Image: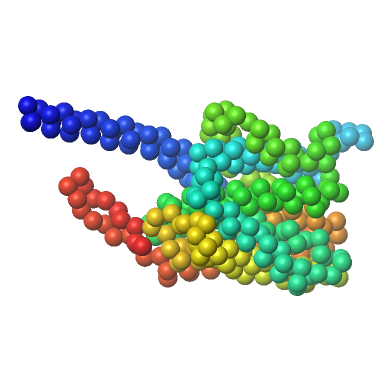
Amino acid sequence: MAVSGDSESSGGQKRAAALLGRFVRGISGPLERFLAIEAASGVLLFAAAVSALVWANSPWAAAYEQLWRTPLGSGETAHSLEWLVNDPLMGVFFFVVGLELRREVQHGELSDLPRAAIPLAAALGGMLLPAALYLLLAGDPGSRSGWGVPMATDIAFALAVLALLGRRVPPALRVLLLALAVLDDLGAIVVIAVFYPGADLGFAGVHPAIAGVALGLLTPVAVADRLIPKLHPWVAYGILPLFAFANAGVALSAGSEGTGSASVFTGIVVGLVVGKPLGILAASWLTLRTGLGALPPGLGVRHLVVLGLVAGVGFTMALFVAQLAFADAALLASAKLAVLAGSGVAAGLALLAGALLLPYPKSQSSDTGSAVQPDR
C-alpha cells in the first residue's frame, strides 16, 4: 500500500508539474513572440531610417520630399501622404501600445506593485533627467519646447540591440525593458496631451496618439489578448518602418541652419546618451535602497547599466514628439539628426557595456538534460 501511495503521489506531482509547465508556456509564449517581433522590427526600422537618410542626401532628394507631399484627395480637406503615415497609421500604433499596457497591467510586469516598482521608477527617472538636461542645455525660448523629445525609449530598436548580445541577455532583462518602454510611451502620451495642446489634431478633435492609447486602455483584456497578435505584426513590420522611412530623411546640412539648432542637437543627444542611463540607474537604486521594489531573480546592477544605456535608443516616439515640438524646419531637422545620432551612440554604448558586463550563461547538466543557469 505504501508503494502504491508513493506511486500515486508521484503521479500526481508529475501531472501538476505538467499542468504548471503548460500554464507557464501559455503565458511566456505570447510574450516571447511579442519580443521577437519587436526585435525583428528594429532591424527593419534601421534599414528604413538609413534608406531615408541616404535618399534625402542624394541628388534625388527632391523626389523624396515630393513623395511625402503627394496629395490625398482634393479641396480644403486634402491631406498629404506624410499625414496618412504620421496621423491615422500611427494612431493604430498607439492603439497597440494601449493594448499592451492594458495587458501588462492585468497580468504582466505591472500587475502588482512590487513587480511594477522598478520599471515605474526607472521609467520616471529615465524621463525626468533627460528633460531636465535638455532644458539646461537648450533652454532658450526658441528651442525650449523640445524637452519632451529625449524622454521615450524605442522598444523595437532597443530589443534589436539586445538581440545582438545573444545569450548574454537573460529573458528577465528583456521583459524589464518591455515594461519600462511601455511606461515610457505612456509618459510620452501624457506629455503630448498636457504640454503640446497646439498639436495638429486628428479625428473628432482628439490627437491620434491620445485617442489610440485611450481606446487600447479601455479594451477588455480578453479582447486585447486576441487583438495584439493580430495587429502587432502589421504595426511592427509595416507601420513603424513606414514611419521611419517618412521621417528619418533629413538633409545633414539642414541641422546646422537657424538659431538654436546646435543647442537642440546637443540637448537631445545628451538627454538620450547621458540622461537616460543616469536617470534609470538613480531611480532604480533609490527604489531598491528604500525596499519599495526588487529586481527580478538573476538581475543585478550590471544589468541595470545595460538597461539604462539601451533605453537611450529613442527613435520612433522621439521623432513623433519632435514633430509636435518644432514648427521651425531647421530646428526640426536638427532634432531629427540628434535623435538618429543619440540613438546610435546609445546603441553602441549598450553593446559595448553588454559585451563587457554580461558574461555568457554557464550550461549545467542535470538528470533531465542541459539547463542554462543565468549568471548572477
Q: Identify the residue shown where x is 28% and y is 32%.
A: 16
Q: Could you tell me if residue 70 is visible in this image?
A: no
- How is colour applied across the structure in the image? rainbow
Residue that appears at 64% across and 39% down? 98
Name the residue nearer the viewer: 112 or 365. Answer: 112
Snapshot quadrant of residue 343: bottom right
Task: Give the quarter of the image for residue 11.
Answer: top left
116 relative to 88 in the view: left or right: left
Q: Is residue 299 above or below residue 64?
A: below
The quadrant of the picture occupied by the C terminus is bottom left
Q: As displayed, is residue 212 above or below residue 66?
A: above
Relative horizontal placement of residue 186, taking residue 203 as reference (left or right): left
Residue 239, percent across and down? Answer: 65, 41
- Quarter of the N terminus within the rendering: top left
Say which residue appears at 20% left-offset and 45% top-offset.
Answer: 368
Which residue occupies the foreground of this view, 54 or 338? Answer: 338
Is residue 118 among the parts visible in the rendering?
Answer: yes
Question: Is the residue 373 above or below the residue 240 in the image?
Answer: below
- Side of 284 where 25 appears, left or right: left
